[in-house]
Image (spheres, rainbow, N blue to C red):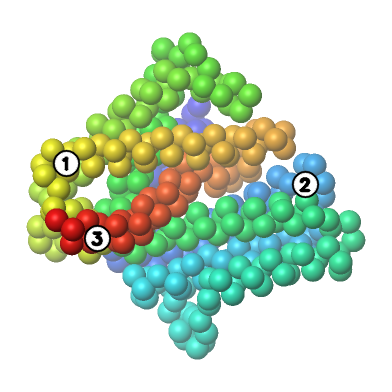
């Protein structure tokens, strides 16, 4: 427990400034790229528990993960000033997400011919790793490009859900939620964690206009300013919208945690790695946030299409 607490303090000291200080955005992106590589290696090493993966395939998978990560970021106009896009522009290269996916798919299925004992199941494993890690970390970076507030909101929800699910689970947990995946998780813990996260997330969204000057150089803006507008909501409708969004985020956070737990249980490992003493690996520490970041980004993209249509219909 002492080691876990010390690691948590060190992570907070390092990560909080990197996440919230605008001047450190390049450092944030470099750290995300490093975590992308480490998470890829963690998943690939996990696959070794059932069948040893050739080193060449591992290196290729990491490269393909970075390629997918970069192509997704390059496809978002909001990310035009990110480190990845600046580097691509510097070398005069543009990455198409669809072309990148096609090349990844062709490379992997071709490996069945050119790599001994590399079969269709191995293709599926590598493709899963590339998609899982590449999309998750790219989503996290894109949310940061939309604004620091999106990352803060995301982390508030996922951390509150995780911490208070543990607290409620230890004190009140009697009904197992997913005994074959994560025996320690209970419905009482899940509900308690979501309830607390719901209150925290809702209050952050509701009172954000009063905090906005700290994030927008003194300007009073709503939370989704620059993404889509929701002025057409009534006050009651706005409250319902905020509650449903936060509820969805908290539930997705727990699903992301269970997805990672299912993978570890399938391959018989306790942690993905030992990078963070007392916490495990990159995926052990950030599994919920990564999964939820993808859901959140999908919501924002759908919202940019649906909300203007609703606004025009009113």
Which labelled disc corresponds to residue 194? none
* Residue found 40% across the figure and 70% down from its top: 76
Q: At numbered mark 1, what does the secondary structure look like: helix, strand or loop?
A: helix
**Residue 172 place in picture, x, y as percent:** 41, 12
* Residue found 66% across the figure and 49% down from its top: 43
Q: Residue 168 falls in which quadrant of the image?
A: top left
Q: Indicate which label's residue lies in the foreground, 1 or 2.
A: 1
Work out whether residue 312 can be spotted. Answer: yes
**Residue 117 place in picture, x, y as percent:** 89, 56
Q: Which residue is mark 2?
A: 48
Q: Residues within 10 Å of mark 2 (few under 14, many from 20)?
A: few
Q: Residues within 10 Å of mark 1 (few under 14, many from 20)?
A: few
Residue 70 higher or lower than 298, as above or below: below
Q: Indicate which label's residue lies in the foreground, 3 or 1.
A: 3
Which labelled disc corresponds to residue 309? 3
**Residue 40 place in picture, x, y as percent:** 62, 55
Q: Earlier in the sequence, mark 3 or mark 1?
A: 1
Q: Residue 207 falls in which quadrant of the image?
A: top left
Q: Residue 139 falls in which quadrant of the image?
A: bottom left
Task: Locate the C terminus by quadrant.
Answer: bottom left
Q: At numbered mark 3, what does the secondary structure look like: helix, strand or loop?
A: helix
Residue 72 higher or lower than 180, as above or below: below
Q: Which residue is mark 1?
A: 237
Q: At numbered mark 2, what does the secondary structure look like: helix, strand or loop?
A: loop
Q: What's the distance in space between the residues labelled 2 and 3, CA to CA? A: 49 Å
Work out whether residue 20 can be spotted. Answer: no
């Amino acid at each position: 427990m002492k080691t876990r607490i010390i690691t948590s303090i060190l992570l907070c000291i390092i990560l909080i400034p990197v996440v919230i200080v605008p001047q450190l955005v390049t450092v944030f992106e470099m750290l995300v790229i490093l975590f992308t590589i480490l998470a890829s290696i963690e998943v690939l090493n996990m696959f070794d528990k059932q069948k040893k993966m050739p080193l060449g395939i591992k290196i290729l998978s990491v490269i393909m993960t970075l390629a997918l990560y970069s192509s997704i970021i390059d496809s978002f106009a909001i990310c035009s000033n990110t480190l990845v896009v600046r580097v691509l522009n510097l070398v005069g290269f543009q990455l198409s997400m669809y072309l990148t996916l096609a090349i990844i798919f062709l490379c992997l299925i071709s490996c069945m011919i050119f790599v001994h004992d590399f079969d269709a199941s191995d293709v599926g494993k590598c493709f899963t790793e590339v998609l899982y890690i590449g999309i998750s970390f790219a989503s996290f970076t894109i949310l940061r490009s939309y604004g620091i507030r999106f990352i803060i909101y995301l982390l508030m929800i996922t951390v509150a859900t995780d911490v208070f699910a543990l607290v409620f689970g230890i004190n009140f947990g009697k009904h197992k939620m997913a005994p074959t995946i994560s025996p320690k998780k209970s419905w009482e813990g899940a509900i308690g964690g979501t309830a607390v996260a719901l209150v925290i997330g809702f209050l952050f969204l509701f009172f954000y206009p009063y905090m906005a000057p700290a994030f927008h150089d003194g300007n009073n803006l709503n939370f989704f300013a620059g993404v889509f507008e929701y002025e057409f909501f009534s006050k009651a409708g706005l409250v319902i919208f905020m509650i449903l969004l936060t509820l969805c985020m908290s539930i997705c956070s727990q699903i992301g945690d269970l997805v990672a737990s299912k993978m570890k249980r399938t391959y018989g490992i306790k942690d993905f790695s030992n990078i963070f003493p007392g916490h495990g690996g990159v995926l052990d520490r950030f599994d919920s946030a990564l999964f939820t970041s993808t859901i959140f980004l999908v919501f924002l993209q759908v919202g940019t299409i649906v909300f203007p249509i609703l606004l025009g219909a009113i």
